Amino acid sequence: MKKIGVFTSGGDAPGMNAALRAVVRGCIYYGIEVYGIRYGYKGMIEGDIIPLNSHSVSNIIQRAGTVLKSARCQEFREPEGRKKAYDNLKKFGIDALIAIGGDGTFTGAKIFYEEYSIPVIGIPGTIDNDIYGTDKTIGFDTAVNTALSAVDNIRDTADSHDRVFFIEVMGRDSGYIAIQSGIGGGAEMVMVPETKTTINEVIEALQKGWSRSKTSSIVVIAEGDEEGNAFEISEKVKAKVKDLKDIRVTILGHVQRGGTPTAQDRILASRLGLSAVEGLRDGKTGVMVGVINDEVTFTSFGDSITKQKPLNKDLIRMVEILSI
Ligand code: F6P
């Protein structure tokens, strides 16, 4: 293995740059040439590939986003697109890949590896924390802290006006950001896709609080919740409760994808970046590198994509108990 190509793909996540830095510096340390493929699979198809050196990744460990840029690429789903990508890698003499992204990125990497046998290791980078084979994904900790700080701010104004706030956080089909920012922010209720929560249960929780003379309440909703988005849920609640307090809805959205990566994310990313390079050197391929119980592990792409990382149901129970 002489030349590694590295790319970031799918939604960006704070800490991706720290992972890139670790990959580049790890390669240099082991005497491997390293190329950056810009815009993920799109850049692979278009040949947007640049050599990287130690200076290319100076001063980026603290920056969110990805200096390599990212994209979601439809063309790579087609065999013709993947053929173009492979031809470009051959042209640059790239003989192994490191893919930083989420499950969509790993699905592409798995198919590509099966078709062209080019060694590839994935690094989990997504704020959603929805990847099996690692306790945390890069960007999750930062996103939770951003969401938490927003919940705190909203709590201040909710309290002044005796209001009920429905706050929607990201996570696609996963409730990790919601449960952690909800617990950290002392939410009265958290709604996640992993467990069913009815509108009546939400109303009950709110009314319980009011009967104990709570004047404001916060419901944190994961965007993938089965009852709908925060606006829909607030409307459903309004339709059922007559004497409802003033309601407001806040959708946090992409604010959760930016911001200075936390220490945890930078350290996780650095560890995973270097371990990916070392994994390739040890002959590992078709796998994602992760950290479980503080140990570096490798999980097949198949498992990392298809197996569900369960949300600890005890955390949900906790919200109910602690919000009395
Ligand atoms: O996967 C990360 C994520 O931010 C999800 O939480 C969200 O559902 C999605 O990406 C948004 O995607 P986009 O940035 O393409 O709108």
Image: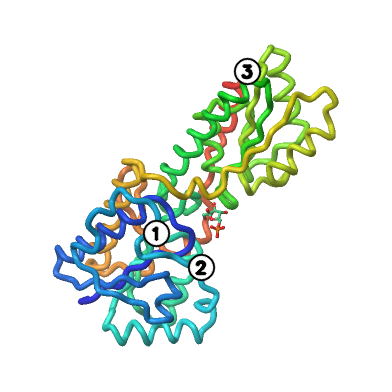
- Residue 100, by quadrant, is bottom left
What kind of element bears circle 3?
loop
- Residue 34, by quadrant, is bottom left
- Within 8 Å: ligand 1 and the Cβ of disc 2? yes
Q: Is residue 192 above or below residue 4?
A: above
* Quadrant of the picture in which ligand 1 is shown: bottom right
Left or right, 252 with reference to 32:
right
The mark closer to the camera, 3 or 2, is: 2
**Residue 196, percent from left and from top:** 69, 41
The three-letter amino acid code for the residue at tag 3 is Ile
Q: Residue at x 53, y 50 (%)?
A: 254
Pointer 2 residue: 72
Q: Is residue 133 above or below residue 39?
A: above
Left or right, 307 with reference to 248:
left
**Residue 41, percent from left and from top:** 44, 73
> Is residue 314 in view?
no
The mark closer to the camera, 1 or 3, is: 3
Q: Residue at x 33, y 76 (%)?
A: 49
**Residue 109, percent from left and from top:** 43, 71
Return the disc, 1 or 3, that comes first in the chain's sequence.
Answer: 1
> Is residue 309 in view?
yes
Pointer 1 residue: 299
Pointer 3 residue: 324
Q: CA distance from mark 1 to mark 3?
A: 41 Å
Instruction: Compare residues 7 and 313 and report the one nearer the observer.
Output: 7
Q: Is residue 133 above or below residue 301?
A: above
